Amino acid sequence: MRRLIALLSVLLALLTLPVAAQTRAPLVLAAASMQEALTDAAGAWAARGHPRPVLSFAASSALARQITAGGRADLFVSADTDWMDVVAKAGLVVPGTRATLVRNRLVVVGPANGRSVVATRGAALAKVLAAGPLAMADPAAVPAGKYGEAALRRLGAWDAVAPRVVRAENVRAALALVERGAAPYGIVYATDALAARGVRIAGVFPARSHAPIVYPVARLTGGEAGGEAEGFRRFLLSRAGQAILTKRGFVRP
């Protein structure tokens, strides 16, 4: 009888291991601009009886480097395809799980009581943006900064504006500079402007002035949340998940 009880205990422990793995809360590494949207989505997922996903936000470049350096996580949401490509080429994306999550728009923000930037080309735009420091995520690495530099180059204003650029570590840090009055204008995503206080959208860059702003999502091979990670990924791509994200200003893929 003692042997039978011991055997049953072992079998019970083995049967519960997959369940424990599936109920582990997924760790999600996401672009800083996804903060409010993914927080809302994580809350909705938890309300359905799942462990609430653990969210970590930073510049996509920093997160991709963290992943390729051995950092473990279950999901990665990048603000551009380039940094997702870096992770994928390192063999760290679960095959078949990469998908376009949402899109975004690029805007100029200024003080809430400021005037609109009506110019969209060349010298007139440069005159407005070069009048004082221009806050941007670092164009050398961060997606928002790369989109911003591309747009200004396409519109013929980059050479005049570049000496006045204040490079921030991510798009939210650039937004904070405008919120604090440290810079009269900043280039951020439309969703960041909608989430901010004390600033307004002073201008919207033409879509043709930069590459499409695409946010891919994928599961990572180093993840440990198993079914929960895949479930949350699918939820984000579902009609219910997309409704949550678009409410925060993102555009459906």
Image (cartoon, rainbow, N blue to C red):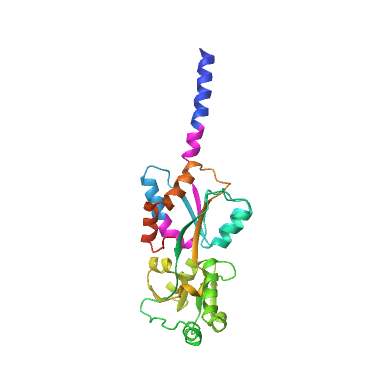
Q: Nearer the viewer, residue 222 or 154?
A: 154
Q: Who's the residue at 57% across and 71% down the image?
A: 139
Looking at the image, residue 31 sits to the left or right of residue 45; the answer is right
State the count of labels: 0
Q: Identify whether 149 is placed above or below 88.
A: below
Q: Who's the residue at 43% across and 55% down the image?
A: 38
Q: Identify whether 4 is placed above or below 41.
A: above
Q: Most extreme residue toward the top, as rendered?
A: 1
Looking at the image, residue 236 sits to the left or right of residue 63; the answer is left
Q: Position of residue 203 (x, y in %)?
A: 42, 77
Is 190 inside the magenta-drawn segment?
no
Is residue 25 shown to the viewer in this render? Answer: no
Q: Nearer the viewer, residue 6 or 224?
A: 224
Q: Identify whether 37 is placed above or below 52.
A: below
Please report the bounds of the magenta region as a residue range: 17-38
The quarter of the rendered structure image containing the C terminus is bottom left
Is residue 85 shown to the viewer in this render? Answer: yes
Q: Identify whether 134 is placed above or below 69.
A: below
Q: Who's the residue at 38% across and 50% down the image?
A: 43
Q: Position of residue 110 (x, y in %)?
A: 42, 77
Q: Position of residue 56 (x, y in %)?
A: 50, 55
Q: Nearer the viewer, residue 40 or 124?
A: 124
Is 22 inside the magenta-drawn segment?
yes
Q: Quadrant of residue 252?
A: bottom left
Q: Position of residue 85 (x, y in %)?
A: 59, 58
